[in-house]
Image (cartoon, rainbow, N blue to C red):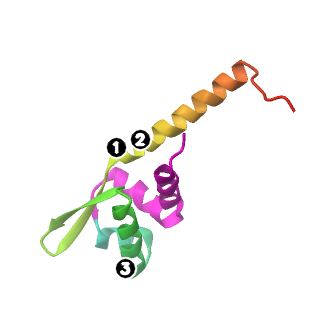
Amino acid sequence: MMTSAKTELIRVIADPLRLQIVTLLAHETLCTTHLVEETGARQTNLSNHLRVLREAGVVETEPCGRFTYYKLKPEVLEDLAGVFGDLAQTARTTIETNRKRAC
């Protein structure tokens, strides 16, 4: 069953810029400067989106001198993928058994 926390996580990741950030961080750990260059977003806008991702537990920070690096927490995405995998399996079983509610 989809919990409110999972629903909120889907909402957080569904934002186009945040999804782009997550995709970039899946490939490498990046600092804000790199993310500004890669996304074309303004630094203040990007910082707000990174805060949302951090508060949702999707990314974590790593201070490095005067820079802050961001890295993706893959276990969060794996957990969410598991929810969708379970839904797909339930749907498959429903189709195979021709289960439907009578009207």
Q: Residues within 10 Å of mark 1 (few under 14, many from 20)?
A: few
- Residue 73 in the figure: left or right of residue 1: left
| For marks 2 and 3 on the same chain, the one whose residue lies earlier in the sequence | 3
Quadrant position of residue 98: top right
How far is mark 2 from mark 3, CA to CA?
30 Å
Residue type at mark 1? Glu
Screen quadrant of the N terminus: top right
The location of residue 51, given as percent across then percent down, is 35, 69
Q: Nearer the viewer, residue 64 or 55?
A: 55
Q: Is residue 6 magenta?
A: yes
How far is mark 2 from mark 1, CA to CA?
6 Å
Q: Specify the farthest residue to the right.
A: 103
Label of residue 66 in the image: none
Q: Secondary structure at mark 3?
A: helix
Magenta range is 1-30
Above or below: residue 61 compared with residue 73: below
Q: Are marks 2 and 1 in contact (CB under 8 Å)?
A: yes
Residue designated by label 3:
43
Q: Secondary structure at mark 2?
A: helix
Residue type at mark 3? Gln
Quadrant position of residue 38: bottom left
How far is mark 1 from mark 3, CA to CA?
27 Å
Residue designated by label 2:
79
Q: Main secondary structure of the magenta part?
A: helix
Residue designated by label 1:
75
